[in-house]
Amino acid sequence: MLDATQQQAIDRLYSDYDRSDSPGCALGIVQDGQLVYRRGYGMANLDHAIPNTSTTAFDIASESKQFTAACIALLMEDAQLSLNTDIRRWVPAVPTFGTAITLDHLIHHTSGIPDYHDRFTRSGLAENVLSQQELLDYAFQYDRLDFAPGERCSYSNTGYLLLAVVVQQIAGMPFGRFLHEHILQPLGMRNTLVHDNPNMIIPRRAFAYTRGPNGGWQMNVSWNQTVPGDGKMFSTIEDLALWDQNFYEPKIGHGQFCQTMLTRGRLNDGTPCNYAFGLDLGEFAPAECCGHRIITHGGGCGGFESLLLRLPEVQLSLILLCNTRDRRFRTSAAEIVNIVLNAPAFRTKEEST
């Protein structure tokens, strides 16, 4: 458990947002399987003065990729797919590009398929609500790959859109329903859902905010896409703590699930990637940390930002969900680890560059 001094030091990191006229974030610290600290800072809804708490539902953006990958891992365990299968078996509309693109390439971001995200945002289409097919049509209007599959690792949201389609095709049901029945419900994640309908009600939802021209806060509604796979999930600190605990005491899968989730990709020449199944496997140099292995993934979309960081050797995890964007949210994770582990040499990648 954290003592009062540690709690006060952590709260000081978010003091700028710990007020009734500002958005902010919710923080969870999981240690030895227990959610030892949970706290909200700022407001989930400024219109109605609703504060952020550990049960507030935030858009977790790309942090949701690990759930998409987890669906693929479960289908692998049930022998319903192989990672070596060409994506066109399940999504024949994908252009040929003159080479095979496998599910393995998509999982590990080695496909060479261009990332639709930046182009999509610049196009102005982000203000529209598009169907899955319309979004995929946009993603594949480009007739070439960025590089040959397996040549290098380059983050592509497009690949995870396709993985969600694969899940739908094999399971014969919407992606969100499969995720709910096979992962969320068994783990008791009652307040986590796929946001695949722009009209759906999301209990205890946080709204995203950004600074306006006059320096005050305004709603951030610039991202209306509701096609799942690369994002579009809402979750809470409490629910993500249950997901985190599954990596120590698995409740889903047939025994190999967690090992599969931590399987790194490999390039054509055998070089391992740092990316596994929707998870970034990093290890800080001894001079920058205590030699602890780190498993993490973050996300950012519109005015939302999220981070889940796990140090498995010391069974410590941080969950940070925010409804405004601030680079300090990510770097504060390292400071929290310092406080909890008394390891002042720890730094994040952002701070090390």
Image: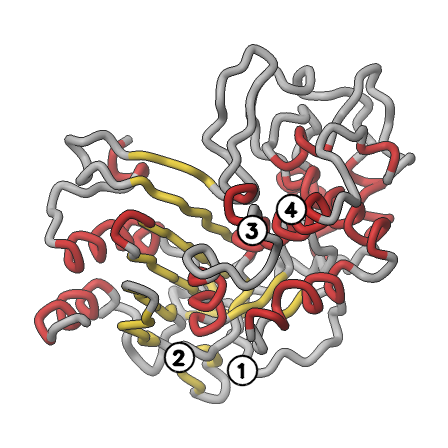
Q: As shown in the figure, which amino acid type bears the numbered disc 1?
A: Arg
176 left or right of 28?
right
Q: Earlier in the sequence, mark 2 or mark 1?
A: 2
Residue visible at 77% across and 40% down? 81
Which residue type does callout 2 highlight? Answer: Thr
Asked if residue 343 lies left or right of residue 313, the reply is left
Give whichever of discs 1 and 3 has the lower sequence position: 1
Q: Position of residue 59 (x, y in %)?
A: 55, 64
Distance from disc 3 to disc 2, alpha carbons, whole Å, reads: 34 Å
How many numbered discs sit on the rendered protein?
Answer: 4
Circle 2 residue: 53
The residue that mark 3 highlights is: 255
Mark 4 lies on residue? 73
User: Which percent across, then down, holds residue 93?
Assistant: 90, 35
| Secondary element type, mark 2 | loop
Disc 3 + disc 2, Cβ < 8 Å: no
Residue sitting nearer the eye, 110 or 33: 33
Q: Which circle marks residue 204 in the picture? A: 1
